[in-house]
């Protein structure tokens, strides 16, 4: 048995229209779907229709199935799009390696065109996403709550999406009620439900999200349906069911952007896949596809499979043999593999990079009688989203619209300041911006069900200064903070979390501000504290002995080592990623709001923002 891996759309239109060419280059890997190594075309070969491709295929027994007994189905997958509507030109977002050199790829306008060309001539075709559509790092997308991404996915005909970890960078309700069902929050066209490029209000996705292993921690129920069944035409007036199981990377709950401890729990991937594969079979569904937001690596280039490894590869080796096809994502990797299932039968396992660089195509043939996929006829291909095709005009208008709205959003006034708020620190480690951000985190933490007593903030979310003098934007004035300036000054999509820490742990965390650097010298990595905390340290003492509980005042009272306190901090900080390991001993976490929006809400709540006085931390001794 074998998987043919063929490439389309590398040449210009005149070449695309030619008949299949002679094979020019050998892919250096053993295709496990065959008893022999299959020689396939080079990256410069255009591929004729799937009908012509199928004529070259035979089963491992050498017996050809009659075409009339089979139903063809094309699956087109994208993964980890992350809202990259624009065609970027930087190396990480616009290039992908091939044996012939770097290819320039990506951009929503080209994704749409390639998808239309790939679907042409296919009676049965399904477009799917392997997750991480959201957390669009491009400003024009994230500033509008990822709604532009949903408009794009609706426009290209996505029929369902696995829940990726970044689909949960906000709450479960944000995904299910807002992004899926279009339920608004706040003021329309200000806080959510923005007017889209067609002039219509955001209405949510036209497709469902599926995950078989994300549960609500309180009810124990899955937050979405575990799978969906698509009925495809059998060409004779009937239909054949095809089941798609969604799965989400299991560390989603503890991830620093998707942090949901206490709210969500994750089931194991293989266990969940096997459970719902059996459930599908019990309903008479034999053709089953796993859409797994978990990844791996397989060396080489996007069409290769060298030394495959990683969680998705392990899943492919262990998951139920009832599953015929596996799409993967999450790692932003690219490969096209054939991995034996537990019964020793090979099946395709494919990952299509990220940010719209590749489209993963898997063509399957389904037996009309058994209603199962005939694996020997499966074809898997990763297509680079090259820019040598016409830009889709509808999507071009959409992208242009959101880029312009992004400029408008950037220029919106947010707050007034009386002086510079900068990252520049004094000798005790304080800065005006850091103190302001700590106050914002504290204000956010007080909204939690178990409110914060104070806040601690590391240097990592401080991205830029807020200056009193007006900038270059035409909407700016002296003392005015624009939305875009606020956005780029603080945050990286991390939630403010309120956790329980003992006084002894808090003292130790403050001691961890001093640590040895790799070169053997001492480094100082100060934390900012909210306005209701004051403490002093003695630098003349050895590291680990510079802060005393009686010199730490919380709301005017000395820190009690045996008392529990509620502390507001970013998930990245409490997970130990900023270098304060004691933080990992937190308890009772409650997620509140993501950093950008927490900062925005705080600034908007202030009439005029004064420069914080840098007196929260003092030094005693030499």
Image (cartoon, rainbow, N blue to C red):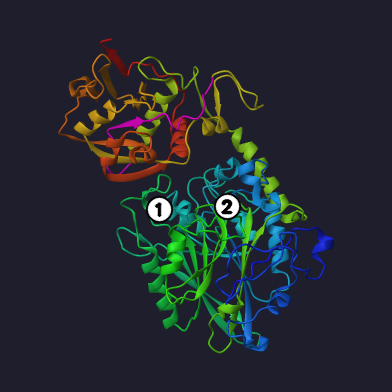
- Residue in the picture at 48% in, 81% down: 285
Give residue 566's quadrant in the image: top left
Disc on the earlier residue, 1 or 2: 1
* Residue holding disc 2: 354
**Is residue 318 placed above or below 322 in the rendered structure?**
above
Whether residue 506 sits left or right of residue 41 in the image: it is: left
Q: Are there few (<14), some (14-19), or many (20+) residues within 10 Å of tag 2?
A: many
| Cα gap from disc 1 to disc 2, whole angstroms | 18 Å
From the viewer's perspective, is 52 left or right of 584?
Answer: right
Q: Nearer the viewer, residue 149 or 67?
A: 67
Q: Which residue does the image show at 40% across and 48% down from the upper left? A: 255
Q: Secondary structure at mark 2?
A: loop
At a point 47% along the width and 39% down the height, the residue shown is 597
Which segment is the magenta one?
Answer: 448-467
Residue 350 x/y as whole percent: 55, 63
In the depicted structure, whether residue 65 falls above or below residue 308 = below
Of discs 1 and 2, which sits in the foreground? 2
Magenta stretch, main secondary structure class = loop
Residue 447 appearing in the image: no
**Neighbours of disc 1 within 10 Å: few (<14), some (14-19), many (20+):** many
Return the x and y of residue 340 as percentages of the image width and height: 48, 71
Pointer 1 with pointer 2, Cβ within 8 A:
no
Residue 247 appears in the rendering = yes
Mark 1 lies on a secondary structure that is helix
The residue that mark 1 highlights is 252
Q: Tell me if residue 95 comes above or below residue 121 in the rendering.
A: above
């Amino acid at each position: 048995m074998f998987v043919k891996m063929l490439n389309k759309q590398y040449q210009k239109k005149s070449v695309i229209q030619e008949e299949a060419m002679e094979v020019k280059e050998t892919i250096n890997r053993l295709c496990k779907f065959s008893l022999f190594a299959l020689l396939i075309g080079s990256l410069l070969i255009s591929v004729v229709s799937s009908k012509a491709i199928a004529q070259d295929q035979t089963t491992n027994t050498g017996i050809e199935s009659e075409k009339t007994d089979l139903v063809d189905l094309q699956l087109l997958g994208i993964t980890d799009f992350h809202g990259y509507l624009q065609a970027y030109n930087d190396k990480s977002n616009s290039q992908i390696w091939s044996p012939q050199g770097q290819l320039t790829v990506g951009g929503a306008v080209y994704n749409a065109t390639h998808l239309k060309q790939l679907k042409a001539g296919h009676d049965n075709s399904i477009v799917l996403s392997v997750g991480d559509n959201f957390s669009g790092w491009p400003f024009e997308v994230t500033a509008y709550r990822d709604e532009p991404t949903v408009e794009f996915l609706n426009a290209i005909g996505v029929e369902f999406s696995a829940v990726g970890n970044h689909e949960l960078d906000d709450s479960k309700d944000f995904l299910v009620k807002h992004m899926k069902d279009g339920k608004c929050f706040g003021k329309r066209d200000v806080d959510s439900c923005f007017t889209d490029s067609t002039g219509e209000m955001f209405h949510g996705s036209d497709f469902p999200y599926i995950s078989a292993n994300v549960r609500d921690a309180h009810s124990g129920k899955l937050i979405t349906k575990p799978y969906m069944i698509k009925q495809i035409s059998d060409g004779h007036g009937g239909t054949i069911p095809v089941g798609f199981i969604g799965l989400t990377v299991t560390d989603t709950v503890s991830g620093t952007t998707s942090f949901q401890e206490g709210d969500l729990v994750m089931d194991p991937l293989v266990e969940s896949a096997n459970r719902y594969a059996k459930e599908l079979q019990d309903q008479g569904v034999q053709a089953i596809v796993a859409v797994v937001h978990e990844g791996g690596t397989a060396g080489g280039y996007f069409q290769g499979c060298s030394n495959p490894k990683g969680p998705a590869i392990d899943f492919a080796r262990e998951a139920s043999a009832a599953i015929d096809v596996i799409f993967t994502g999450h790692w932003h990797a690219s490969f096209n593999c054939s991995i034996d299932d537990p019964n020793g039968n090979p099946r395709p396992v494919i990952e299509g990079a990220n940010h719209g660089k590749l489209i993963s195509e898997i063509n399957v043939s389904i037996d009309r009688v058994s209603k199962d996929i005939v694996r020997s006829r499966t074809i898997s291909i990763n297509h680079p989203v090259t820019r040598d095709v016409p830009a889709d005009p509808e999507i071009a208008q959409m992208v242009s619209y959101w880029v312009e709205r992004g400029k408008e959003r950037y220029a919106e006034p947010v707050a007034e300041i009386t002086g510079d708020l900068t990252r520049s620190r004094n000798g005790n480690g304080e800065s005006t911006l850091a103190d302001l951000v700590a106050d914002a985190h504290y204000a956010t933490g007080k909204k939690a069900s178990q409110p914060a007593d104070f806040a601690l903030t590391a240097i990592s979310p401080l991205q830029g200064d807020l200056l009193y003098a007006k900038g270059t934007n035409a909407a700016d004035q002296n003392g005015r903070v624009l939305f875009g300036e606020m956005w780029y000054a603080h945050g990286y999509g991390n939630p403010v979390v309120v956790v329980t820490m003992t006084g002894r742990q808090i003292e130790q965390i403050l001691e961890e501000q001093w640590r040895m650097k790799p070169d053997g010298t001492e480094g100082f990595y100060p934390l900012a504290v909210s306005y209701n905390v004051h403490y002093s340290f003695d630098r003349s003492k050895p590291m680990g002995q510079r802060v005393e509980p009686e010199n730490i005042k919380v709301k005017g009272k000395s820190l009690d080592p045996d008392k529990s306190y509620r502390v507001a901090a970013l998930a990245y900080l409490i997970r130990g990623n900023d270098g304060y390991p004691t933080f990992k001993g937190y308890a009772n976490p409650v997620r509140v709001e993501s950093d950008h929006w927490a900062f925005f809400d705080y600034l908007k709540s202030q009439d005029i923002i004064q420069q914080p006085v840098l007196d929260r931390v003092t030094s005693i001794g030499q």
